[in-house]
Image: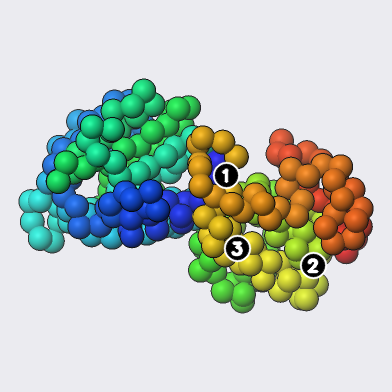
Amino acid sequence: MPELPEVETVARALREGAPNGASPLVGRTIQSVKVLWPREVASPTPRAFVRRIAGARVQSIGRYGKYLLIGLRGSRDDADALSLLVHLRMSGRLEVVSRSAAFTPHARLVWLLDDGLALRLEDARKFGRVWLVDDPAEVISKLGPDALAITLEEFVSRLRTRHGALKPLLLDQTFIAGVGNIYADEALHLSRLHPLRAADSLSEDEAVRLYAAIRQVLLEGIAANGASFDWVYPGGKFQENFKVYGRTGQRCLTCGSPIRRLTVTQRSTYFCPVCQPPAG
């Protein structure tokens, strides 16, 4: 599943244009939309979605956690502001293409734009979701602070109120939004913290280390255009910099000990038993 760096990379391509020459989405007018898989539209109904978005102009592209936020100006009135939210889930790909390339076997929604372009959402596994709302808070209000926007003080304060293990906590989007399995493991290794350490057992120094490590791995991920594993999310290079993720049995790049794998809340978790001792 794309995490914050991958989603930010998609947002950047939509704002500025993609390296493959794809045009920016900002400033485009949505002439109509084809809903090819109705379940992909979470809200409103697919019929209302099609009707309300027609004629809207794309004003901005943002991100909150793992959600893409596309700001629109509706066609009915200059004050008619709308927000299109997209969660790519496991296999979603969102990109601007020519209309002739828009209708692929895995295309689930196609927004037809001006100048012969289209915004195509491909989603082989059909888990992605799209919302069209007046206020993004209707969708993201239950999330915690964005992982790159939260302050150190707020992070430490929120950490002090949690009693569970660190790895599940970092995956909990109500704690902080945007961190997933890859970047949680990389941040815990960088901060020298065991995945099963209790959150409320961390010293002040350890909490600060974890906060800094989360920011560092996310920013490094964005600089590398995220991590790529297969056709679902191509073009990223952060996988070339993994210190622990997916490296079971290989030598730790810090101390040389073999990387271990354990399962935490049904998720594969990778760590160095020497650099990340259970008791800190």
> At label 1, which amino acid type do we have?
Ser
Determine the residue located farthest toward the top in the rendered image.
105
The residue beneath circle 1 is 228
Q: CA distance from mark 2 to mark 3?
A: 25 Å
Q: Nearer the viewer, mark 2 or mark 3?
A: 3
The residue depicted at 74 percent of the width and 58 percent of the height is 188
Q: CA distance from mark 3 to mark 1?
A: 14 Å
Q: Secondary structure at mark 1?
A: loop
Q: Residues within 10 Å of mark 3 (few under 14, many from 20)?
A: some
The residue beneath circle 3 is 220
Count how many numbered circles sit on residues in the image.
3
Q: Secondary structure at mark 2?
A: loop
Q: Viewer-proximal residue, 159 or 94?
A: 94
Q: From this viewpoint, is residue 110 visible?
A: yes
Percent from the top left, x then y, of residue 197? Answer: 81, 56
Percent from the top left, x then y, of residue 235? Answer: 51, 47
Q: Residues within 10 Å of mark 1 (few under 14, many from 20)?
A: some
Q: Residues within 10 Å of mark 2 (few under 14, many from 20)?
A: some
Q: Viewer-proximal residue, 245 or 44?
A: 245
The residue depicted at 74 percent of the width and 39 percent of the height is 268
Q: Is residue 179 above or below residue 107?
A: below
Q: Secondary structure at mark 3?
A: helix
> At label 2, which amino acid type do we have?
Leu
- Asked if disc 2 and disc 1 are in contact, CB closer than 8 Å, the reply is no
> At label 3, which amino acid type do we have?
Glu
Residue 157 shows which numbered tag?
none
The residue depicted at 33 percent of the width and 50 percent of the height is 21
Residue 202 shows which numbered tag?
2
Q: Is residue 129 left or right of residue 183?
A: left
